[in-house]
Amino acid sequence: HDQILIQRLDLAQNTLQLRCALPEQNPEYRHGYGDDEPESVLSDGLSKLPRSRRALCFDVLQAVVEGTPTNGDSSNAPIQQLSSFATLCATCLHGESDPRCLTQLLKLLHEVQNRLYIYFSSSPSDFPTVALFDAVAPYYPLQFTPPPNDTFGITQEGLQTALFNIFAFSKYDQPADTDSMLNLTVGIILERLGATTEEERPDVCDQLEALHDLDKLLFPTKCLLLSPSNVQELSDTLFQTHSQGAQGVVAGSTDGNHRLLADQTRTLVSNFAVAVEVNDNLWKIFVGDRLQQHAPVLSTSPQSWKGRSTTAYLACLAASGGPRTLQASLQACIPKLMDVFKSISSVEFDEEKISAASLALAAFFSSFEVAFKRGEKAGISFHPHPLEPFSKNVLLPLTTLIGGTGSDLVRKDAITAFCALILVTPSNIFDQEEERIIIDMLLSLVQIVDPIIMSDESDELKLVAAKTLGSVIGNSEPTCTVASVIRDSESVRQEIKSTILPRMISSLTHEGAITSKRFDTLALARASEAEKTVASSVVEALIAVLDEALKQGKKDNARQIGSILSIVLKNGGGNAKEAFFASSISPAAIVDVICGSYTKENLPEKVLRVGMSFLALPTSMEENEQFEKLVDFGHEIIGYILPA
């Protein structure tokens, strides 16, 4: 078998040499893409031949590859001849520009990778990987537009797939081998993604495509095959790319691509971080060194553009779902942020810096929730609780800022951090006194959004307080798997269930609470979206009050309640809509009340009967105006409940 294989390889190479030396004698092959070479051309190589002759040469190589047994014996294989043949096939691609031949060769090279693997399985380093890469690398990134009236069916997507099949073939790759196909390919993708100077900065759309290629190449199984040097370059380039995307967002980019670039970079960073947790060296390069290098900026200047961008990047590391990365991220970053809060005891502190530190804390607490849910899906448990060393120390500074005399900026960002903290911290970390502090803080937020009290706080502060109350009320039922003081503390949960929620529903339907801006409505709509039982309580109460107001003819009150119900139905998600149709007072009953003024008994004496319906003929201008107002009112109320 080995002798036959050697003869086939020699025959193919001799055939190519002979065909390259013959003049063109098949003009019928000349058609399609551009002009062919003159008919009587002696070849100095394949690149000098017309397309038709090149295609015939590639057919010869394809026949040899397809005829190579896939069950050969690697111990006695003619490795040198096979390696030379693979190199010859790769050399054929040099300078090829015709899309038909390019498609043919890319498929041929991928078949060479597949078919010859069995012979190199015991010595994969002998396969000419670098030769194949050098041949295909100039075609990345591949740009191709089919000519008008193309009949060959060659597309850019097809060429890209054929090219990437070669890049993604990793059977010959060994871990940490810098000359493996994977490492070589990652290198050119990172060149496309990164930029060494401001002038060389690549197009954002091009960077998004490069991120997609990286994701397709590395996941789910190939991250550990990267060399340490490539992991270092990957870490540096992703950090730089994320900064560029974040900077574009701050600068006011309107096309959305910069935000997408930052988001997709963080996603790739998070996925790669958890993938390399099992390799100490790669994890240290990608996660440990990055934390050590950039965490200090969180204590020195979290309010700067660099500080905010760094916060987002390091928080996405924490959100990866890997317990090692989460623990390291929290231990490196939260103490740095806590250092910032030491200044709040002074008479004058840097409000912008304190505000940025609060938002950064919120980002890391939220990242823990994401990491917990990811880890739960993967069967990973977090013990001891990663937030145990930090939550107690964070609570008091945040509540001090919220209840203090600082600016709205400081207070609303502290509320955001407080919300993130209590949503992810279990009750066993807090003592009874701290739970009382949490309850009192929630009650103070209720007062801020209460339309009866009508506090003089700014709308921005009321909005943040409403969002916090909505999240807390909606997540207070023990249906979520993330342990939280608002769920597993009986005293806190009971206070929410028996005091805060009823009080807010009462103010929602109170006749004296008719104001133009209702932040309590936003809070309860948000809570309804998160929890069915809350949606049922809120919608049931609103429908009952609406029904009563309609029956008593209180039009202004009915309009107000109808508009509130409409907001809840629009923003309360599927839970609110389900609660609307499951209410003890059906939607049809509401319509019947609205239409009560149109019943036979209420019609004027002069009525024209038409079949089963009645046509009311107003007898005066005053009666006509009354009917018009009645119809308009009915349309208005029905319009409020249409979102369901």
Image (tube, rainbow, N blue to C red):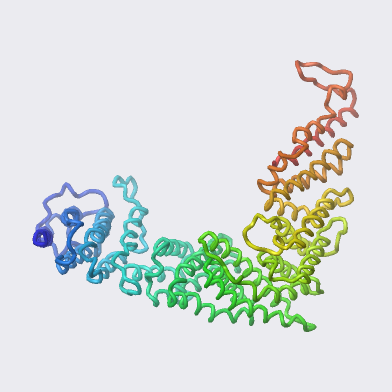
Q: Residue at x 84, y 51 (%)?
A: 506
Q: Nearer the viewer, residue 442 or 510?
A: 442
Residue 494 located left or right of residue 549: left
Is residue 219 rendered to the left or right of residue 79? right
Image label count:
0
Q: Quadrant of the N terminus?
A: bottom left
Compared with 127, 523 (above or below) is above
Q: Quadrant of residue 366?
A: bottom right
Is residue 514 depicted above or below 95 in this figure? above
150 and 418: which is toward the camera: 418
x and y percentages locating residue 243 in the rendered image: 54, 72
Residue 540 image-quadrant placement: top right
Residue 429, image quadrant: bottom right
Q: Which corner quadrant holds the C terminus?
A: top right
> At 67% from the left edge and 67% from the top edge, which residue is drawn?
425
Residue 45 lies, in percent from the top left, at 16, 64
Q: Where residue 380 appears, x then y in whole percent?
A: 53, 64
Is residue 554 in view from this perspective? yes
Q: Position of residue 93 (x, y in %)?
A: 24, 62
**Is residue 54 visible in the rendered structure shown here?**
no
